[in-house]
Image (cartoon, rainbow, N blue to C red):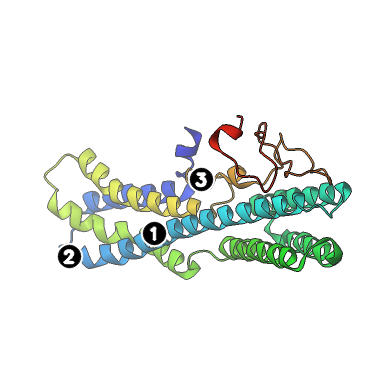
Amino acid sequence: MQKYVSILDQKTLCVLFISVAFAYVCLQYGYRSSVNITLFSLAVIFPLVFTIREAFKRRDNAIQLLSAFKASLTAAYFCFQSNRKLDIEGKKYISGQLEQLSSMLFATLYSDKSKFNSVREKMDEIFFFVSERQEYFSSSTAMKLFRILKDAKESMENIFGLSTHGTPVSLRAYCLVFIYAFPLIFIPALVNQISSYANWVIYLVSATPGFILVTLYNIQERMEDPFDQSGLDDIKIEEFDFRLPTNSTTIRHDATVTDLEFGQLPNLPPVGQFATRDSVQM
């Protein structure tokens, strides 16, 4: 319930106060107008709908980038773990670095966006780890790792860009100004049309459009940063956090089959022999 109430703030109270107060002035002093408010309504609604749509688009793009980032780290993890030349200590170290990189990225997105450079430095450490151990990787494996890490870094930089650059600030400021001005144009025309109704009906109808507009503006504002976990539609970033498999074991150097266990591996026939369906015991 608290999150639903979070879209109501001081702007909501301000617009409601302006609407009700100006409706009282119109009723008390007989102020009326017959202005067509259609064009003025479009001047408010169109940019507001545009900013909301762009905020949703940014959110969807962020989800795709976070998915690509986690997939790249997972691919890098298995690539390191399946390398028989790399010692156990090296595998443990790089696994911890990958997990730490993911934690640093999401902590930065959630709380302190000024620490993006520290996340970039952590990514550089992983690149240097591969560069300084060329003898442990074949040329094809090294190229594969660099490509995977490059994809992860590209996703990370795009995430930083989305987090730093939101929808146009000037357009949102324009929307807010016209939301405050809307009751001053709308209410005299409204009172002119429904002056025969009871006063409480006029007050209610006068406050409704302003309330709707400012609520939509607040929804857009909550979606502006999809990582801060303050809005109903924010991204659940914990679902994209890379974590080491809890049931995986470190690969042995003498293993004939990669020992990244997700349950017990089947008993396979020796390499080079044709395996029939009956020869694999589950």
User: Which quadrant of the structure image shows residue 265?
Assistant: top right
Quadrant in the rendering for residue 42: bottom left
Label 1: state its secondary structure: helix
Q: Position of residue 250 (x, y in %)?
A: 79, 41
Amino acid marked by disc 1:
Arg
Residue 168 % position (x, y):
48, 68
Q: Farthest left residue? A: 196
Q: CA distance from mark 3 to mark 2?
A: 36 Å
Q: Earlier in the sequence, mark 3 or mark 1?
A: 1
2 or 1: mark nearer the eye: 1
Return the residue at label 1: 53
Rendered residue at 47%/55% (across/down): 60
In whole angstroms, how far apart are the C-alphas of marks 3 and 1?
16 Å
Q: In the rendered image, is residue 264 in sight?
A: yes
Horizontally, is 57 left or right of 22 in the view?
right
Residue that label 3 marks: 231
**Element class at badge 2:** loop
Residue closest to the far top: 282
Viewer-side residue, 246 vs 197: 246
Mark 2 highlights which residue?
36
- Check disc 3 and give the amino acid type: Gly
Q: If you read the primary sequence from the N terminus, does the residue marked by circle 3 or circle 2 appear first?
A: 2
Position of 281 relative to 95 (above/below): above
From the viewer's side, name the closer residue of 62 and 184.
Answer: 62
Within the image, what quadrant is residue 45 found in? Answer: bottom left
Q: Which of the pair 47/93 is nearer the observer?
A: 93
